[in-house]
Amino acid sequence: MSKIVTPAIERQMKINKRRPVGYIASPFKEAWRRLARNKTAVAGLIVIAIFIIVAIIAPWITKYDPTAQDYSCTLQPPSAEHIFGTDNYGRDIFSRIVYGARVSLPIGLLCAICSLVTGGVIGIVAAYFGGLFEDIIMRLCDIIQAIPPMLLAIAVLAALGNGIDKMIIANTIALIPLYARISRAAIYTVKENDYIEAGRAIGAGNLRLMFKHMLPNALGPIIVTTTFGVAGCILVVSSLSYLGLGITAPTPEWGSMLSNAREFLTSAPYYIIIPGVMIMITVFAINLFGDGLRDALDPRLK
Amino acid sequence: MGNNDNLLELKNVIVHYETQDGVVEAVNNVSFSLKKGESLGMVGETGAGKTTIALTIMGLLPKPPAHVIRGEIRFKGENLFDKSVKQMRAIRGNDISMIFQDPMTALNPVLTVGDQIAEVVRLHNKMTKAEALDKAKEMLKTVGIPEERVSDYPHQFSGGMKQRVVIAIALACNPELLIADEPTTALDVTIQAQVLQSIKELKEKMGTSLIFITHDFGIVANICEKCAVIYAGEIIEMGTVEQVFRHPSHPYTIGLFESIPKLDGDEERLKPIPGLMSDPMDLPQYCSFYDRCMRRCDSCKNGEPAVVDLGDGHIVKCKLFESNGNAEGGQE
Amino acid sequence: MIRFVIRRILWLIPVLLGVITIVFILTAITPGDPVSMLVGENASEETRQEVRAELGLDKPLVYRYGKYIVDIVTKGSIGVSYKTKKPVWDEIMLRFPNTIKLALLSLAVAILVGVPLGVLAGVKQYSVIDNACIIASLIFCSMPEFWLGLMLILAFAVNLGWVPAFGIRSWLGWILPVATLGLRAAANIARISRSSMLDVVRQDYIRTARAKGQKESVVMLKHGLRNALIPIITNVGSQLGSLLGGAVTIETVFSISGIGKYMLDGLSGRDYPVMQGGVLILAFVFSIINLLVDIAYAFVDPRIKAKYKSHGISKAERKKLLASFAKEG
């Protein structure tokens, strides 16, 4: 009764032949391998990479200054000269989109990272020390979370005034409680694990426990949350700019372009379609990548 | 083989899990049979494929990734693999039922235990809800739980009591075959004894055939007549409890017995079996126990060992016995 | 249970007090002078002082803060608009039905579309339905909602002319705003429903139900869905939060006279009481919704109900209960 060889086993035997004896992949290598095999996640990553590269080489791929106004050709539909057309000031929309990537992408990233770092540190410290300190922090979070995040961002932005930095601060404040809660919950889950007890038993200090043992184990969910956070922040930023808060003309930012394009909904629909599509593609790509990342780090669901 | 009084008969069953990370050869050429009222203990390490065998019989393999590559399972003479989904549903819970390993997670947390027992009763009997609930109360009493607790939720029960509820669900329709998958592993020793006792009593009272999966020889000796030792998805030794316990033949079985602490012996140390079970994703073409075997020889690497009958149905799958005894089957 | 609800309602008081404090601090540091907005940059210093005194802005912030709270408690007043001189409460109540109608209708659409699709996708993982559901929900999650609104206007109002682009004079006017908010929320809910269903179908009790010989559809609905509901309910609660936030932009896009639009107008006019009142009311509504969500858990999961109950009983009772548990175990 020799071994039954199915097509799936044949494939497997080929892979086994390539591997050295006793091959055991590290968890991160495994995760990376799973990610690389996930076609949609890779597609997302490629799109993100293209957008980043385009943002970096913006001056070399655009013919026009994104802020240069030319009243001789306003609201031109897409043509060979202006592939995305021009806006009501005669500015080249393609240039503005490309330069806009230089604003929209970093803002999204910075908003996510700032809120994650501050919220994360607050949550981790609260979970770790517990007691009255934790209670106070969490009750404060309750209060801030009683205001829908978008409203809070609007109110903070109104108080601080316009500007890219203020946009980041407003988003960070609105998102801190959420991230504090997520990281606190993550730490609680990790804290329950025996290896933390084991670490304590061999005399590891608080900081060591927190950063050497807990953080790496909570890292997977944190990376995934950040990825989705970037996507969410890009959307919120565009909404705020649309309302005329935060980033205003003439800075080429996708949301503020849409705010400007609103008046020309019927006369120049391409002007409102193109920046929106750009936002959608970017956020879609980031979300695809985030989904792939989550599946790769948590293969349980696959 | 092929006796007609066999309630259950497995013939050359092969099951693979085809995952993204590779193919797990979970069940390899497993054949055995079980008569009415008979009980079989399946012993083996974690990951040896015992649960997969049980799920295959139940028709509950998660597909994908699981695939039945070949073989047949005859229950009362009919091949279960030929049954339609609907026919299998009528068999599950009624003719064949199963007790699962972890009582903590086997019960639905949002339904009362009464509802969960009544569910299986109503599925296979024409009864009103009230009648089914009465039956549920009766079943609770049978497994030693006061019937007032019929409307309690699982979280209000302890582990041992939850397992008894699971047993009540499994036995509610008087199944002809009961598969118990390590029903006591998750329980305290004292509770274990109670649960085992109730399974034993119920089996005797109802004349149910039993497949008892465990890694504890003691339990097998206590409640089973036959014993099968599973290694890497294969039955490497099988016989009556008497045969296997008195004359363990396969080096793995011998190793298992030697690694059990004995109270009366004067050995100072336990003898664990060296090494780990072979990776089920990469099983060798020869005996899968070769790497850990204390009695291996060169001929062991020449293809798979044949199944040898040592007499009276005590079978063993090892090269050592191929010369003596009559080699049997397998090459079909 | 009732004790739990009462405790949660009492807890609303410090939360709303906190909200008022935050909004007061924010308005205190907001640049721009409401007086200039009212009387214009060129008004004389005298008029400015007069208006300032009339609005109570000459008093220190702490005094205004105290007065605001005292007014809420004694008069039930949440301030008077600087611009229209009408009580903010009345103005908000005029617009409140529109906002809440928009949010609730959208939520209904979101639940009716999102939950069944997500559950179906989770049950039939890797199927065509699953993939279509993943892609569609991801696309809707990736659009700024105001832009989705504008695109719907472009397609259905401008090009096809089926529905009015702006305003809510007839029920037709509600279709686009509700679709905009509803589809986005549906996408979120579908994603959560799917992953929560995926999680649940792997649980042992699903296998137990199958082992009983139960029909697959019943296994999924009776055993699967009810257990998957908790994350879904949580998500529905937070979706309502973002629906209320999203109402601000959507009311602007579709020119619906709701709280969101009222607040934005108040914001640009530095009409602080409008802003404060709006945030306060929305925070109150949002908190009540979260309370309802927490109560809904109890109906889905007996374990949570037991937890709520144990918080509501006296210490002696709890001890007795614990002792009885210990005896059983």
Image (cartoon, helix red, strand yellow):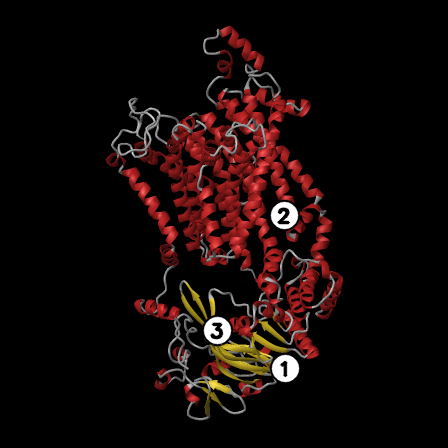
Report whether A301 appears left or right of C285. Answer: left
Q: Is residue A120 visible?
A: no
Q: How many marks?
A: 3
Q: CA distance from mark 2 to mark 1?
A: 47 Å
Q: Residue at x 42, y 44 (%)?
A: A226
Q: Quadrant of residue B223?
A: bottom right
The spot of residue A88 in percent (x, y) is 35, 25
Q: Is residue B131 above or below residue A163?
A: below
Judge the density around disc 1: few (<14), some (14-19), many (≥20) Cα neighbours within 10 Å: some
Which quarter of the picture shows residue B113? bottom right
Name the chain letter of the residue that bears numbered label 1: B
Amino acid found under the numbered disc labelled 2: Tyr
CA distance for labels 1 and 3: 26 Å
Amino acid type at mark 3: Ala
Amino acid type, callout 1: Lys
Q: Nearer the viewer, residue A274 or B180?
A: A274
Q: Which residue is mark 3?
A: B48
Q: Position of residue C117 (x, y in %)?
A: 53, 50
Which residue has dot 2 on it? Answer: C297
| Left or right of B142, for residue B265 | left
Which mark, by number, is residue B36?
Answer: 1
**Residue B228 placed where, x, y %?**
53, 81
